Image: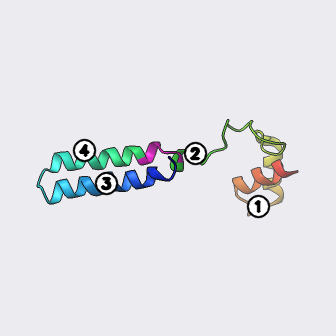
Amino acid sequence: MKKLLPIAILVLAAAGITVGVVFSNLLTGLAWVALALGLWAYSATTAGRATPGGANAGPTGTGPANAAKVCQYREEHPDATIMDAVRATRAG
């Protein structure tokens, strides 16, 4: 199913553009394109990038960030981004 979803999204978008342009039925074409965009936004390829189960899931080092450690790391490394600080404090 994972491999068919991007194909289905592309087919829906192409069908919507074809219906809207070639057959001059703009409303139906826009509906198909909107369905393709909604499917893309809801798909696991877009929404599934977060850690499954939230911040507390996974092995040691992937739990919630400690704010005090992140602030201390940012003070010691002024050029570090917040994500750099979170990754560095979780790793140790």
Q: Are marks 1 and 3 in contact (CB under 8 Å)?
A: no
Residue segment shown in magenta: 40-44
Q: Earlier in the sequence, mark 4 or mark 1?
A: 4
In the image, farthest residue toward the right: 92
State yes or no: residue 43 in magenta: yes
Mark-to-mark CA distance, 4 and 2: 25 Å
Circle 4 sits in a helix, a strand or a loop, which is it?
Answer: helix
Mark-to-mark CA distance, 2 and 1: 32 Å
Q: Earlier in the sequence, mark 4 or mark 2?
A: 4
What's under tag 2, amino acid-wise?
Gly
Q: Are marks 4 and 3 in contact (CB under 8 Å)?
A: no
Mark seen at residue 31: 4
| Residue at the (67%, 43%) spot, across then down | 51
State yes or no: residue 32 in magenta: no
User: Which is nearer the eye, 6 or 30?
Assistant: 6
Instruction: From this view, report whether residue 2 is shown above or below residue 18.
Output: above
Q: Residues within 10 Å of mark 2 (few under 14, many from 20)?
A: few
Q: Are marks 4 and 2 in contact (CB under 8 Å)?
A: no
Mark-to-mark CA distance, 2 and 3: 22 Å
Mark seen at residue 13: 3
Q: Which label sits in the foreground, 2 or 1?
A: 2
Circle 2 sits in a helix, a strand or a loop, which is it?
Answer: loop
| Residue at the (67%, 35%) spot, across then down | 53
Q: Position of residue 4 (x, y in %)?
A: 45, 51
> Which residue does the numbered mark 1 point to in the structure image?
78
Q: Earlier in the sequence, mark 1 or mark 3?
A: 3
Instruction: From this view, report whether residue 80 is shown above or below residue 29.
Output: below
